[in-house]
Amino acid sequence: MRYVFRIQRFNPETDKAPYYKEYEVELEPTDRVLDGLNQIKWNIDGTLTYRRSCAHGVCGSDAMRINGTNALACKVLVRDVGPKVTIEPILGLPVIRDLVVDMDPFFEQYRSISPFLINDEPPPHGRERLQSIEERERYDDTTKCILCAACTTSCPSFWANENYVGPAAIVNAHRFIFDSRDRGAARRLEVLNSRTGVWRCHTIYNCTVACPREIQVTKAIGEVKQAILYRQST
Amino acid sequence: MIHTHTFDAIVVGGGGAGLMAALHLSRGGQVRAAVISKLYPPRSHTGAAQGGIGAALGNLEEDHPEWHAFDTVKGSDYLGDQDAIELMCRDAVEVVLELEHMGLPFSRTEDGRIAQRRFGGHSHNFGKGPVRRSCYAADRTGHMILQTLYQQCIKNRVTFFDEYQVMDVILSEGRAAGVVAYQIRTGDLHIFRAKAVLFATGGFGRMFEVTSNALAFTGDGPAIVYRRGIPLEDMEFFQFHPTGIAKLGILITEGVRGEGGVLVNGQGEEFMVRYAPTMKDLASRDVVSRAIYHEIQAGRGIDGKRYVHLDATRIGREAIETKLPDIADFCRTYLGIDPADHPIPVQPTAHYAMGGIPTDVDGRVVIDDKRTPIPGLYAAGECACVSVHGANRLGTNSLLDLVVFGRRAGIDMARFALEADLPPLPQDAAERVVEQIEWLRSANGDESAATIRREMQTLMMNNVGVFREAKGLAEAVEKLQELRERYRRIRVQDRSRAFNTELTETWELGALLDLALVTATCALNRTESRGAHYREDYPKRDDANWLKHTLAYGKPDGTIEIKYKPVVITRFQPQERVY
């Protein structure tokens, strides 16, 4: 079946401003949007630029705006968005070229919440730290994050203020705050209670819709807000 | 413009092996190390590994590293080096606990310990029946390992150069002296000088048409060192995982069968019992992949087509949602089915390179049958060949290989980097890459990379896949040489410096073509069947002539010279392999 891909293009070496270019490709309805991009790049226009790697929704390379909604190009089938598909880079991060944005600010925000287990107690010798099935389940949802930035770059609060730490960083803070083995909650909650922290979230739910891993992002942010309030009240 | 950086140690690749090495390099605080990756490290393909990491923790039933070692040796069809295998299976317990202590969110048992499940080829009492050895985090074990190691590297303030593509290794006075990298964002070249260099660039399944591998899996590391005269070991052994989603090749973990899923043919028969009476669906991967093809060739595919069914419905909805949630997601997304209700159409998919850059157990690259090292040069993970996987890797041993040998390489590199001085930088260090980039920026021939890549992938799938014979292999060697000639006449449209992925993709195709030719040549050369290498014209294993590793050397005139290296056998004498 024939599909039309309308793609936002921008090359800093030759273009003053972004523009749209249309391509026609022959695809099976069950093909991924990424298959369409690959067909264009390999057979029509080698200059089309985007990131991709695993092609099945686990590496997080190919987050983009597909018909106005953030998604991974390898996790959206063309039958669900065609026959005419508009593809743009994710919003709120500087565009380097075509669909490629500068991810460095995103990873800086991720780093700001200390995304690693904090626990100075020596681990038990010769065996694991114990954790019950229930304790493990408590933070399961937020372990699924693949740092694709689909959530953060769908958030109007982030568009309005690029210093907002953003949903992805909060999700990764949640993953540790609610891990029974971690002792760093105070440090993370302090960061997230700042002017650029969780209070910028106005529960718009774009992030939850955008997450290709189906993480309940807004719920996780809510739990972090509650943890801050609980800590202040005790 | 060429930038120059100096470090004590350079790690090329930000997946499990590279990050584990970087973490251990950073631990003493004395070694200045950097990780160079063509991706952001959390995009690495380690994150796609699903089912688990093997370690004889014995959390649910009796288990021992010796049993794990035996299964690995048997799985390797006796081509794995038993000293390295014993060491890996012993280190396994310690390293899995180390990962847990770093915060890895393993699934848990009722009593709060690391959960374990059955996996292909893993047995108790030296082959008596399945054992629960695979330590898992739902079906996202690789994702959790990659995330945890990246987190720990951030904690330890490891230096990263993200989206830099390494294109050459610098050798100086017989030692490793650094690498040359292309900065994707700017198109600039960078020389990284170092005393020690580790390649941890992963696999090269993208030489095949149907593969579970990421588009980034183009064998950059092995191709780079091979072009510098370093041999590649056992390249004829490439694993086809039995259960890729039909046509797409997306991996469906062996954990589905570990949890009770069964393969069924077009007649509704659970056929694995005919091929492996004891282990059935949990026989090793080469055995199961061949069985599926036999069923298809006998007309017993589903509706006579080229796939069979993996029936996960008998696992039950609740267990699927808690233990195999990503598999359920893949089935819904790409097939439009719920695996709790419908069987999954599967076919073998090119999955894992057993061969690669030859190393010893400390990751040091060794270049001949006497295991002569190149000081300062290291490799670990899928791009390396220790060899712990021999002719066929057991499921869960890939993640184990990454962390065990990534760690050992990191520790040895730290020791080496503190003792050694910085080798001099050759005058022409960047010359080869400068020439390659200039050519790619102006290449204006009549051939397209996409066409050449597609022809290579179809050829490799048909002639160098699960079943092989002399005529098809000879044809593959000849055609691959033609494809390499045509590659010289390629056209690259994109002339930009910023994020020119047509340039990098075309460079990667060159790497794949070199490795495909080595793979086909070694497969033609080995006139026996062993593990994943199955020759229809030589269907038996031939220990008298072929119980040895292949070493393939690229010669300056473009030919390949094949030499051999003995297999290390300690306690398990080769036996007939029955599952």
Image (spheres, grey):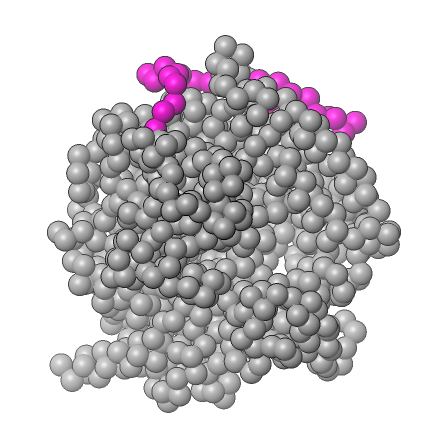
Q: Position of residue B127 (x, y in %)?
A: 28, 27
Q: Position of residue B205 (x, y in %)?
A: 57, 44
Kindly tell me whether residue B397 is visible in this rendering: no
Q: Is residue A31 left or right of residue B381?
A: right
Which quarter of the figure has residue B176? top right
State whether residue B542 is above or below residue B218.
above
Q: Which residue ends up furthest to the top in the rendered image?
A: B544
Q: Position of residue B140 (x, y in %)?
A: 37, 55
Q: Which residue ends up furthest to the right in the rendered image?
A: B445
Which quarter of the figure has residue B150? bottom left
Q: Is residue B318 left or right of residue B418?
A: left
Q: Residue at position x 75%, y 51% from top?
A: B451
Q: Is residue B101 magenta?
A: no
Name the quadrant of the N terminus of chain B: bottom right
Q: Main secondary structure of the magenta part?
A: loop
Q: Residue at position x 63%, y 52% from top?
A: B165
Where does the magenta region start and end? B551-579
Between residue B24 and residue A141, name the one nearer to us: A141
Between residue A12 and residue B444, name the one nearer to us: B444
Q: Residue at position x 19%, y 79% from top?
A: A231
Q: Is residue A46 left or right of residue B124?
A: right
